[in-house]
Amino acid sequence: MADPVRMSEDGGILTVTLDRPKANAIDVATSKALYAAFERLRTDPGLRVAILTGAGARFFSAGWDLKAGEAIDADHGPGGFAGLTEFFTLDKPVIAAVNGLALGGGFELALAADLIVAAEPAEFALPEVRLGMVPDSGGVLRLPRRLPYVLATEMLVTGRRMTAPEAARWGLVNRVVPGDRLLEAAMELARHVCSAAPLAIAAIKEIARTTEGLGVAEAYQTLRVADLPRYRAMLGSQDALEGPRAFAEGRPPRWTGR
């Protein structure tokens, strides 16, 4: 049997492809394989960003594999369902390149990414209520933070689908492109990430994660006094000196991650 998760590297960009015909559904073994890919992103200093996509043109992922015969509360590994939905210590960005239908856990996987590029035919839905369940791998938590409450609630309680153009109108995805340009567009976005300072990106993810849900004053207080090791490392880094120096000298910065 072929591996359900394929990986390739290109200039600091890790491409992770979910390849489980026919619908790229995710069982426990696939969740753990996806986690291994994202853990590789986290620990490899040569990797800066990941692109996550699905094989084929019809499905990004249909979510949890209902035919696998596994318990609904099965242990999907340290990253939670799909290896990413509860991977809260990943300080490098993940770009979801949604090539087709992102349903249920497949949508939750895309929501766990930092950026989303969608092919024009892509659609998003959380149909769990029609199966007597709830999207508790992040959908019920993340979607109301990304969309207006009434719209998120409509999707959650009816399971209705949202097209890629509609998702773009509501700011749920970064951009929508023709299907044959999806990976090209995701790679372009990834290269922009790679041109930025790695410590600064890690600090941004840490600050956003730590201050989520706080008021501005409380968030400022957290920023000033809380234990934020990525942020503190950035403030005292060589890269924080290199950026302004490179700007003043009219040259591209040379990031070292130190």
Image (tube, rainbow, N blue to C red):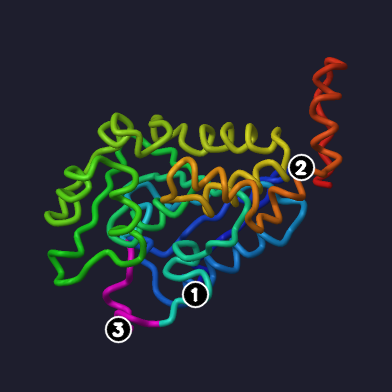
Between 197 and 83, the residue placed more toward the observer is: 197
Which residue occupies 41% across, 31% down?
Answer: 175
| Sequence-first disc among 1 and 3 | 1
Whether residue 247 appears in magenta in the rendering, the answer is no
Residue named by callout 2: 235
- For disc 1, the neighbor class at 10 Å (few under 14, some 14 to 19, many from 20) is few
Tell me which segment is drawn in magenta: 63-74
| Quarter assignment of residue 119 | top left
Give me the residue at 60% from left, 63% from top.
37
Residue 90 picture location, percent across and down: 60, 58
Amino acid type shown at disc 3: Gly
Please state which amino acid type lies under the numbered disc 2.
Answer: Leu
Q: Which label is found at residue 122?
A: none
Give the left or right position of residue 4, taking residue 230 as reference.
left
The residue shown at (53%, 74%) is 78
Asked whether, in this view, residue 81 is left or right of residue 206, the answer is left
Give the residue number, with chain letter if any, for mark 3: 69
Mark closer to the chain start, 2 or 1: 1
> Which residue is depicted at the point 83% across and 15% down?
250
Of 75 and 228, nearer the camera is: 228
